[in-house]
Amino acid sequence: MKLLCFQDGQSPRCAALIADLGDTLEIFDLRHIAALAEARDIGELAAAPAEALAALRARLNAPDGALRTRRIARSQLLAPIPRPARNVFCVGRNYLEHVREGDLKRGIQTPIPQHPQYFTKPPSTVVGDGGAIEIEPSVSDKIDYEVELAVVIGTAVRNASAESATASVFGYTIINDVTARDLQRRHDQWFKGKGLDTFCPMGPWVVTQDEIADPHSLGLQLWVNGDLRQSDTTAHMHFKLGQIIADLSQGMTLLPGDVIATGTPPGVGYAMTPPQFLRAGDVVTCEIERIGRLSNPVRLRRD
C-alpha cells in the first residue's frame, strides 16, 4: 500500500493512493475504515492494530468498481508525518563514496565508520511534497541537498538483533536531508546545520514494507532544476537497515511512527567544483525506485 496524508479543509486526513494522475491523485479515504478513521498521519496508522490494516488491505483488493474513491489535488498532499512526535533520526556517512567526495574536497581522510553515526532533525524541519525549502542568507548561504531512503517504524523495538530488527519496519519514504554546510562545519555536532526550519522534506507517501521485498536494491536519484546530481543504489549503504535499527534500539526504545533517514550517496553540491549550493528559485526533486518522487521549490523566507 501507498499511504498518504492530505489536507482536507482544516484537518489532515489519511488515505491510500489508488493512482497518481500527476496534478491530481485518486485516493481511498481511510475514514471508510472505522478503526482508522481518526488517524491524523501515517505515524498513527503505523501504530494501528494489525486487524485494522488487514481490513484496509482487503478493501483495497476489492473488485474493480467496488471501491469508493475520490480525487484530490496534488497540492493537498502533506508530509506523511507532518509533525513527528519525536525528532527524525538520521544516519551520517553511510555511503562511503559520499564520505570520499567530502574528504577529497576538504583535503582530509575520514576513517571508515565502525558504528553508525547519528544526528536528529526536529519536527519543525518537516515539509511535504511541494512544500518550500526556505532559506535565509543571513543565517546560511551554503544550503545543500541529500536524497535519502527513510524507514518508518511500525512496532516498538528495543535491544533488537540485526536479524530481527527489520520486522519492526512499517514502511519506507523519501527524505531530503537539507543541510547548511557552513553551520554543519561550525558546530562540533551536526544538529544545527541539519535542523533549520523546512530542512526535512518528506514524502510523497509511505510505501508499506510488504511492497518492497529488498530495500537494499532501490535506485535513488536527485535533480536540481532538472540537472541530475545524485544517482546511486541503496545497495551501497555501509550499514544496512537491520544493523541501523538494531544499533539504535540498544537501550533506547524506538516507537511506532519514528522515522530514520539512512544516509545519502555521492553527488552533493558542496563537493562539486565549484560548489553548487541551492538558491531561491531552484526546484529539488528526489526519486527512489518503488516509492515515488518528492519535489520541493526553494524560496527566501519572509517573516
Image (cartoon, grey):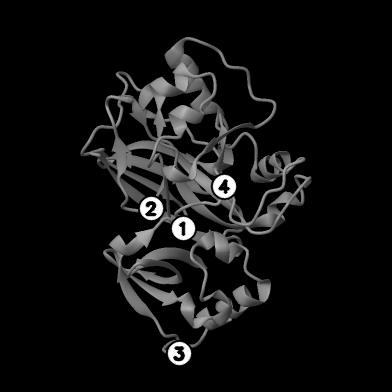
**Relative to 292, 295 lies left or right:** left
| Closer to the eye: label 2 or 4 | 4
| Residue drawn at x 47%, y 39% as measured from the top left | 232
| Residue drawn at x 48%, y 65% as measured from the top left | 40
**Which amino acid type is shown beneath numbered disc 1?**
Pro
Q: Is mark 4 on a helix, strand or loop?
A: loop
Mark 4 surroundings: few (<14), some (14-19) or many (≥20) residues within 10 A: some
Give whichever of discs 3 and 2 has the lower sequence position.
3
**Which amino acid type is shown beneath numbered disc 2?**
Gly
Q: Are marks 1 and 2 in contact (CB under 8 Å)?
A: yes
| Closer to the eye: label 3 or 2 | 2
Q: Distance between the residues labelled 1 and 2?
A: 7 Å
Q: Residue furthest top?
A: 107
Q: Are marks 2 and 4 in contact (CB under 8 Å)?
A: no
Give whichever of discs 1 and 2 has the lower sequence position.
1
Q: Distance between the residues labelled 2 and 4?
A: 17 Å
Residue 128 marker: 2
Q: Is mark 2 on a helix, strand or loop?
A: loop
Location of mark 3 (residue): 66
**Relative to 86, 231 lies left or right:** left
